[in-house]
């Protein structure tokens, strides 16, 4: 069969989750995707949503559709007159947009924060600050002989993680069967799909991850023997890759001292690395960009120089009814956070930049539609393991990039 001369192929990086799979094969007719190869169902749905008019955000000011220029002017006006502005999000934006967002927050004297402040922030801070060892996923593949997913279930959250980067990506297989020469293990509070695949499972009670860790390092009693079995499993390995997920970070909160101590203890007998199972496509990029400029990964205020405090977390700001204007970039707090908290934003000017219709765009005073990273705009992003990737932009031109919008708003700030 002859190839349609109007069709063109393009390799993409899927920005649907923190895996940032870089082997996506898309076929375009003009600027529209007609087929997608290698993507998981989650990634394919995300990329195809860019061509669903019902999913794409529209340029709005107080519910009225307006030209983008008018929406940008209104956003700049609201931010200029604000005395306590907050910039939130940027975890799904390119690194270039994140830098532009940080510059805007600095010019406004605003608070800037992202979702890491109520998820992976402390863990990422430990990695960025050198307290926790990490390595590229390419180094894990075929080298690590023990994979430990802790409080995460990648078949549901990161569908291609184990097939592209870890377990099923190993090329060295056991001749006696299909098992690769690596032990797949998990620590969790419940039976997950991953548990059914793993050779060694360690069950902990909900909320008892800290107790389990203390038992591993010998600071608490090991009532079930699970901690001793886990310790022995790690000691028998030569290279252990830990993949902490939302379950672990939610259990430990901001106090990761025991986890850091455990990694240090385990590291005395084997090589241990930590790669967080980040859901957002570029959370690590934001945290590193902010750290490079301010020395902190989140919860920063530019009101008087640079200061960092938990009172500058988005949750604390909303809980205390502090902001009078909030700029949300590529995030959806109205879907992620409880309504009992978000009701505190009533009367607060809300501006949202997003490619898609979300619960947040539906209540925002100003909505500015932006291009989908990796499909409609280029730039760079950072995978959960710290690898920086360049994005293609085969469908460039349909929507403005968030970089452009943020820079335009910054220029209009008095």
Image (cartoon, helix red, strand yellow):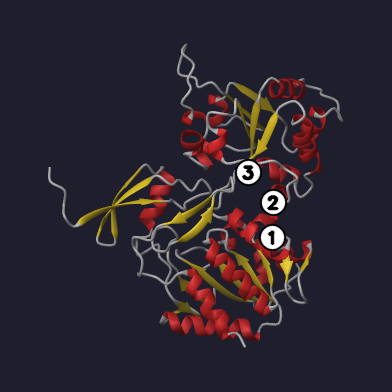
Indicate the position of residue 383 as horizontal and vertical percent values: 54, 49
Name the residue that disc number 1 marks.
291
Indicate which label's residue lies in the foreground, 1 or 3: 1
Note whether 11 is above or below 80 in the view shown.
above
Helix, strand or loop at label 1? It is helix
Q: Which mark is residue 128?
A: 2
Q: Residue at x 49, y 16 (%)?
A: 174
Indicate the position of residue 372 as horizontal and vertical percent values: 43, 62
Indicate which label's residue lies in the foreground, 2 or 3: 2
Q: Is residue 364 visible?
A: yes
Image position of 154 (left or right of 301): left
Cα distance in 3D space between marks 2 and 1: 8 Å
Q: Residue at x 64, y 24 (%)?
A: 201
Indicate the position of residue 138 as horizontal and vertical percent values: 53, 38
Note whether 296 is above or below 365 in the view shown.
above
For the N terminus, which image quadrant?
A: top left
Task: Give the quadrant of residue 308.
Answer: bottom right
Q: Earlier in the sequence, mark 2 or mark 3?
A: 2
Q: Earlier in the sequence, mark 2 or mark 1?
A: 2
Q: Residue furthest top?
A: 176
Helix, strand or loop at label 2? It is helix
Q: Residues within 10 Å of mark 1 (few under 14, many from 20)?
A: some
Indicate the position of residue 221 as horizontal and vertical percent values: 85, 25
Q: Residues within 10 Å of mark 2 (few under 14, many from 20)?
A: many
Name the residue that disc number 3 marks.
276
Instruction: Please report contact status of discs 2 and 1: CB closer than 8 Å, yes or no.
Output: yes
Task: Give the quadrant of residue 320.
Answer: bottom right
For the C terminus, which image quadrant?
A: bottom right
Note whether 87 is above or below 21 in the view shown.
below
Q: Is residue 362 visible?
A: no
Cα distance in 3D space between marks 2 and 3: 12 Å
Q: Residue at x 50, y 58 (%)?
A: 380
């Amino acid at each position: 069969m002859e190839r349609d001369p109007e069709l063109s192929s393009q390799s993409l990086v899927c920005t649907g989750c923190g895996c940032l799979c870089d082997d996506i094969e898309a076929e375009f007719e003009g600027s529209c995707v007609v087929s997608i190869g290698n993507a998981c169902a989650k990634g394919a749905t995300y990329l195809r949503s860019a061509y669903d008019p019902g999913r794409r955000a529209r340029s709005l000011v107080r519910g009225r559709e307006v030209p983008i220029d008018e929406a940008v002017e209104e956003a700049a006006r609201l931010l200029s007159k604000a005395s306590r502005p907050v910039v939130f999000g940027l975890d799904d934006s390119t690194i270039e947009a994140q830098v532009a967002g940080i510059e805007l927050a600095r010019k406004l004297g605003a608070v800037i924060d992202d979702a890491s402040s109520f998820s992976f922030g402390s863990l990422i801070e430990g990695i960025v600050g050198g307290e926790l060892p990490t390595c590229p996923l390419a180094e894990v593949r075929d080298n690590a002989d023990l994979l430990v997913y802790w409080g995460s279930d990648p078949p549901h959250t990161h569908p291609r993680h184990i097939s592209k980067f870890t377990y099923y990506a190993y090329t060295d297989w056991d001749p006696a069967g299909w098992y690769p020469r690596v032990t797949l293990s998990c620590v969790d509070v419940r039976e997950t799909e991953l548990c059914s695949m793993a050779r060694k499972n360690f069950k902990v009670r909900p909320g008892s991850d800290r107790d389990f860790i203390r038992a591993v390092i010998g600071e608490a009693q090991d009532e079930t023997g699970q901690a001793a079995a886990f310790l022995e499993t790690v000691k028998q390995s030569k290279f252990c890759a830990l993949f902490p997920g939302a379950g672990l970070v939610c259990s430990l909160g901001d106090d990761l001292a025991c986890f850091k101590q455990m990694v240090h203890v385990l590291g005395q007998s084997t090589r241990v690395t930590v790669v967080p199972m980040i859901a957002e496509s570029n959370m690590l990029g934001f945290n590193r960009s902010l750290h490079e400029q301010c020395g902190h990964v989140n919860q920063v205020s530019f009101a008087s120089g640079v200061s960092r405090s938990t009172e500058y977390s988005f949750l604390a700001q909303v809980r205390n009814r502090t902001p009078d204007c909030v700029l949300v970039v590529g995030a959806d707090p109205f879907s992620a956070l409880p309504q009992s908290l978000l009701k505190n934003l009533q009367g607060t000017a809300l501006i949202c930049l997003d490619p898609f219709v979300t619960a947040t765009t539906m209540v925002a005073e100003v909505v500015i539609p932006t291009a989908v990273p990796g499909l409609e705009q280029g730039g760079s992003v950072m995978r959960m393991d710290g690898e920086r990737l360049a994005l293609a932009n085969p469908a460039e031109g349909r929507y403005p990039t968030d970089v452009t919008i943020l820079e335009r708003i910054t220029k209009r700030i008095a």
